[in-house]
Image (tube, rainbow, N blue to C red):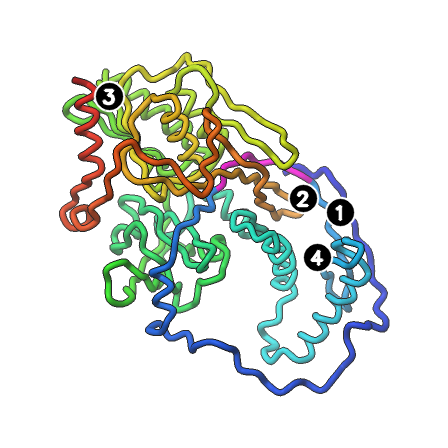
Amino acid sequence: MNQDGDNNYYNHDYGHNPYYQPQPPLPPQLPAGGSGNKGSGHFLLGLLAGVVITAMVGSCTYVGVKLYLMRAEQSARTISGGGDASGELVSDETVKKLEALEEVIQEYYYKEEDISTDAMIDGLYSGLVDSLGDPYSVYYNEEEWQDLMQTTEGIYYGIGAYLSLDPATGLARIAGVIPGTPAEEAGLRENDIIYLVNEEQTQGLELSEIVSKVKGEEGTKVHLTIYREGESDYLEIDVTRKKIESPTVNYEIYDNGVGYIQIREFDEVTTDQFTEALAVVKGSDAKGLILDLRGNPGGSLPVVVDIARALLPKGLIVYTEDKYGEREEYSCDGRNELQIPLVVLINGNSASASEILAGAIKDYGKGTLIGTTTFGKGIVQRVLPLTDGTALKLTVSSYFTPKGNNIHGTGIEPDIEIELDAEKYYEDDVDNQLERAKEEINKMIE
């Protein structure tokens, strides 16, 4: 990891703090709202939950940051906080106020064992990023950053399900289930909403926090309380964790000579996996290709660009624009353009990088899109690892399809719209969207 940049440390001389004058504690106050009973109005939140994919489209840039530290009694305290009239984030006033808040917590908070300096420091950083109001910008502490790095390498310990987050309700949704994993064995389904993890609320947590609760040591169990559309009550499901080696690409050659490639997400391992799959399809003299991007939450911008270069004609793939109007273009030389008919499957869980690929294919008329309108995430995140082992994921630009369309908030409409028949899919193992894609590719071949 790049160690450039400075770490600035300074000591704060404790003295009179105008923000904190010891006072008799106020009478206890009961929190507003219900008791949190699973049978209460919280269940209705499941009906309102949408999907927000937090998997980023972006590159990984190593930067140094200035970490402002102060020493409080015997522990180092990390400064981050509100501003003052001068617009400075860190000032004498914010330092004093943080000292006051800490002293009040130490003196009056009723559970001494719940007070954690490390947790408060992480909370300061997370709160700073949360103040942007952008659900895709996230602060990762050291453990969360290591977990994220491990996941993008295609290996982790968990249940084998892709999760997304709805920022309006703070509930996690299962965006996809990896075949042959504990999630599939336990009966979890795409679009299931996770309400509780081990009887603990997940509403309002960052996706990384929910993921860390779901993941765990191999052989241990996690208890999930699930809302599923069509069920009259919550489902209580136990899943045993194990090591997950997640293939991001699956492929098959059908008897009629049509190739099928499914891309689950765009991670570091995806380019090689897709290259292998496409080589098998081409080597079998396939007459056509079905590309399945359903449930693909996105991932790395360089990876999706590499894959697009194996399919598209010469020209622009995607371009981005940042806050300064600076434009960055990603193009294809057309030397590897796919020469057989192409059908692309999409749905409401296809987001971000998968929309870049689907959008470029649609703009060039290179293939027929079948399914339902995509999620609509037309912005780019960049992960900025910091020199202390933590990281920041920040939205840095918008992206546009070759024809200049920004699909943020609207998504990409299919050429042929068809909803998944969930009853047939889960009860009879019949994928009506895939069957429609097969029909269309056969027409194109004939």
* Mark 2: amino acid: Thr
Label 3 sits on residue: 288
Q: Residue at x 35, y 74 (%)?
A: 40
In depth, the one of 401 and 77 nearer the eye is 401
Disc 2 to disc 1: CB gap under 8 Å: yes
Q: Rounded to the nearest whole Å, what is the CA distance between mark 1 and mark 4? A: 14 Å
Which span is picked out in magenta? 56-63
> Is residue 13 left or right of 149 when viewed as pictured?
right
- Between the C-alphas of marks 3 and 4, the distance is 55 Å
Residue identifier under label 1:
7
Tell me whether circle 2 and circle 4 mark residues in contact (CB < 8 Å): no
Give the percent coordinates (x, y) of residue 275. Answer: 37, 24
Badge 2 is on which residue? 387
Label 2 crowding class (10 Å Cα cut-off): few <14, some 14-19, many 20+? Answer: many
Mark 2–mark 1 distance (CA, rounded to whole Å)? 9 Å
Residue wearing tag 4: 80
